[in-house]
Image (cartoon, rainbow, N blue to C red):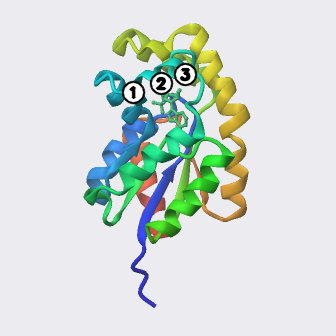
Amino acid sequence: MADNRKTFVVLMGAPGAGKGTQAKILQEVLGLPQVATGDLFRENLKNETELGKLAKTYMDKGQLVPDEVTVAMVRDRLSRPDCVSGAILDGFPRTPAQSIALNKLLEEFNGHINIVPFINVNQEVLITRLQKRSEIEGRADDNAETILTRMKVYREQTAPLLNYFQERELLVEIDGDRSVEVVSAELQDVIRQAS
Ligand code: AMP
C-alpha cells in the first residue's frame, strides 16, 4: 500500500553532537527542510519578538523554553508550505511532553516518524566542542556554566526519550565522534534503509 504520509526524521543527540551540521547536509540530500527549534528561537531573539524575549530568559541559563511555547512554534513552522513532504526535526522533541505533542502534530499533519538517528558523542568531547563553538560563534549559551546546565538538562529531560524511540524500534545509534563526512555518509545510509 502506498504510504503518502509526510516523512519526519528526528535527529537526537546532546548539545554539541553535530545535529545542526548534519541536518543542514541532510536537508540538501533528502529535500526536506531542517526544522531546528534552537535556530527558530535565535531568529525570534534577533528580531526581538515577544517569543524571542521570553525564550532568551531560558536560553541564557541553558534551560528549556516551556513546552507549550515550543510546541506552538513548531506547529506554526510545520504548517508552512515547505514542510509539504515532511521535515528533519533538529532539537525537538526534547521532553516527554514534547514527544506526546509531536505524536499529536503527526496525526494533525498526516505524518509519521521514519527514523530517529541518535548521534552519540561522549561528554568530554561534547564539552570541548561547545567551548570551541563559544569562542568561534560567541553564543551566549555556550559559556562554561551554561554548558554544564545544558548537559544536565539533556541527561535529565531529553535522554529518557531515547528509550521511548528505542522501544518503538525507530532509534539508530551513530558514532558521532568521527568526521562530519563519515557521520553524514552513515546517516544517509541508515535513512535510506528506513525509507
Ligand atoms: P540548540 O540550538 O538546539 O542547542 O538550542 C538552544 C536553546 O534553545 C536550548 O538550550 C533551549 O533553551 C532552547 N531550545 C531549543 N530547542 C528546544 C526545545 N525543543 N524545547 C525547549 N527549549 C528548546
x, y (%) of residue 38? 44, 33
Task: State the mark number for residue 194.
Answer: none
Compared with 137, 191 (above or below) is below
Amino acid type at circle 2 is Leu
**Residue 172 appears left or right of 159:** left
x, y (%) of residue 64? 58, 29
Work out whether residue 34 or residue 172 is closer to the camera in this orientation and state it: 34
**Residue 100 appears left or right of 130:** right
Residue at image x 26%, y 57%? 82
Residue at image x 40%, y 47%? 184
| Nearer mark to the viewer, of 3 and 2 | 2
Judged from the image, the secondary structure of the residue bearing numbered disc 2 is helix
Per the model, the C-alpha gap separating discs 3 and 1 is 13 Å
Q: Do the residues labelled 1 and 2 touch (CB within 8 Å)?
A: yes
Judging by the rendered image, the residue that carries numbered circle 2 is 54
Judging by the rendered image, the residue that carries numbered circle 1 is 50
Amino acid type at circle 1 is Glu
